[in-house]
Image: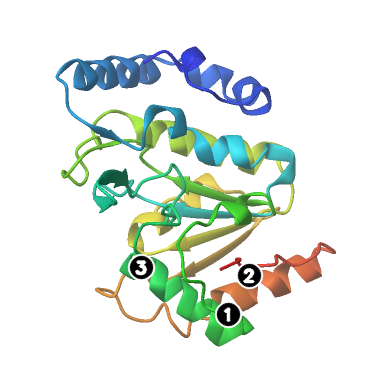
Amino acid sequence: MNYDSIKIVPEWKELLQEEFEKPYFSDIKKRYLEAKNKGVTIYPPGKLTFNALNLTLPKDIKIVILGQDPYHGSFVSNGVDIPQAMGLSFSVPKNVPIPPSLKNIYKELHLSLGIPIPRHGDLSPWCQKGVLLLNAIFSVEKGKAGSHAYFGWESFSDGIIRIISKHCNQVIFMLWGNYAKKKIPLIDSSKHVIITAPHPSPLAQGFVGSGVFLKAQEALKQMGKEGIDWSLDG
């Protein structure tokens, strides 16, 4: 993988230049290419690897929602195999069934803010409103959860979090579950807001009713910023 051949907007490319030049990123490229050469299917599709960064520019970030691993499954629609992963944490394409964790995210939005529950799982409109849907790991082999955890992606996403903490002002970090909470030391809490909660997975308890979205809206208001319109069409 050559990051120059995979679309990434100039604003992020400039900020991440030092990360791209570090040895760990060379390891990522090497391991990604080795996996591709084996003929395995990698999710998300290559052009969506940096989708989260391309859809939310550094200057526009209001909220970061951190996920862990891309979805490793797919859904067959009209004979076409559609990947769940689209390079955005918790999000799936419109014609793919809504995953359980996202259902709970929708439940919490409805409970705390009265947002109508959408019939699809495409969260890309949130990105246009300043929500960075960042996964800690950027790729996965089809059908094998966590298969690219050793690639070095976590060092890259940690670098992104540090850069946001340093270069952006008054960002809200939504850290759900123990894995995400481990990123707290990367964030300057004197200039940013950290909102934690249990993971939205049905296997965890306590996300629905946590009030995380209400807390985020209140924090934005205190910052003098406009709240996020979390509603989705359809």
- Which residue lies at the image location 63% right of the left edge and 70% below the top edge? 231
SS assignment at label 3: helix
Task: Point out residue 108 in the picture as x, y percentages from the top left corner.
Answer: 49, 79
Residue at numbered disc 1? 116
Residue at numbered disc 3? 101
- Name the one closer to the observer, 229 or 148: 229
User: Mark 2–mark 1 contact, CB under 8 Å?
Assistant: yes
Q: Which amino acid does label 2 sit on?
A: Ser
Q: In which quarter of the image is residue 197?
A: bottom left
Q: Quadrant of residue 8?
A: top right
Q: What residue type is labelled 3?
A: Ser
- Which residue lies at the image location 85% right of the left edge and 64% below the top edge? 224
Q: What residue type is labelled 1?
A: Pro
Task: Point out residue 2 in the picture as x, y percentages from the top left corner.
Answer: 42, 13
Please state if 228 lies on the left or on the right of 161 as rendered: right
Task: Point out residue 200 in the picture as x, y percentages from the top left corner.
Answer: 38, 70
SS assignment at label 2: loop
Check the image and report above or below for 9 versus 37: below
In the rendered image, the quadrant that contains the C terminus is bottom right
Q: Which of marks 2 and 1 is nearer the N terminus?
A: 1
Q: Earlier in the sequence, mark 2 or mark 3?
A: 3
Q: How much space separates mark 2 and mark 1, taking CA atoms? A: 7 Å
Check the image and report above or below for 112 versus 187: below
Q: How much space separates mark 2 and mark 3, taking CA atoms? A: 17 Å
Colour approach in the figure: rainbow
Residue 56, which numbered label? Answer: none
Residue at numbered disc 2? 231
Task: Point out residue 229 in the picture as x, y percentages from the top left corner.
Answer: 70, 67
SS assignment at label 1: loop
